[in-house]
Image: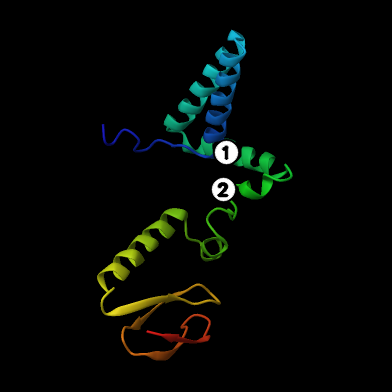
Amino acid sequence: MQNFMNGRHGVDDFSAALGGLGVVLALVGTIFRVTAVSYVALAVLILALLRAFSKNSAARNQENDAFRRIMARIPGIGKSFGAPSGASSSRSGASSARSGRSSADDLKRQARTAKKMWKERKEKAFLKCPYCGTMLAVPRGKGKIIVTCPRCHARIETKS
């Protein structure tokens, strides 16, 4: 049972939108006692589940990209969808889009950084460069120090 979702597409933006639409239609059908709307809601929810459990990721990605392109044209909510997932996605951040990393790589990197910070929390203080966002480690208990960011070479005066 643990490996059930291996090789399956999973939930993407389009599946989540279908699920939300299905729930809204189910509520409307129930509140106003319109059985036709309830049946449509059930069909939409089943479609969302079938998309999530599908093993044909290429087709699901094409459908999701088309959905994202359509949603990006809508004023107001288009900003949250941005470009299709094949292009640089607004959700994964500009830095990961530039460097070619996926969101899974970003999560792994963040987990490694958090583990390192936890392990070294008594010997080092951690601060974020205000200019480029790089996480910097400085020795604890040294008083007022000047740190130079290795990425953007900004000089930061801080207390460790």
Tag 2: Cα neighbours inside 10 Å, few (<14), some, or many (≥20)? many
Residues at discs 2 and 1 in contact (Cβ within 8 Å): yes
Q: Nearer the viewer, residue 68 or 60?
A: 68
Q: Who's the residue at 71% across and 46% down the image?
A: 76
Where disc 2 sits, the SS reads loop
Q: Quadrant of residue 113?
A: bottom left
Is residue 86 found left or right of 144 in the rendered image? right
Type of amino acid under label 2: Ser
Is residue 49 found left or right of 124 in the rendered image? right
Q: Position of residue 139 (x, y in %)?
A: 32, 84
Q: Is residue 138 visible?
A: yes
Where disc 1 sits, the SS reads helix
Q: In the image, is residue 130 above or below residue 57? A: below
Q: Nearer the viewer, residue 7 or 146?
A: 146
Q: Position of residue 122 (x, y in %)?
A: 26, 76
Q: Who's the residue at 36% across and 90% down the image?
A: 143
Type of amino acid under label 1: Asn
CA separation in Å, label 2 and label 1: 8 Å
Q: Who's the residue at 26% across and 80% down the image?
A: 123
Mark number, residue 85 = 2
Q: Who's the residue at 42% across and 30% down the image?
A: 53
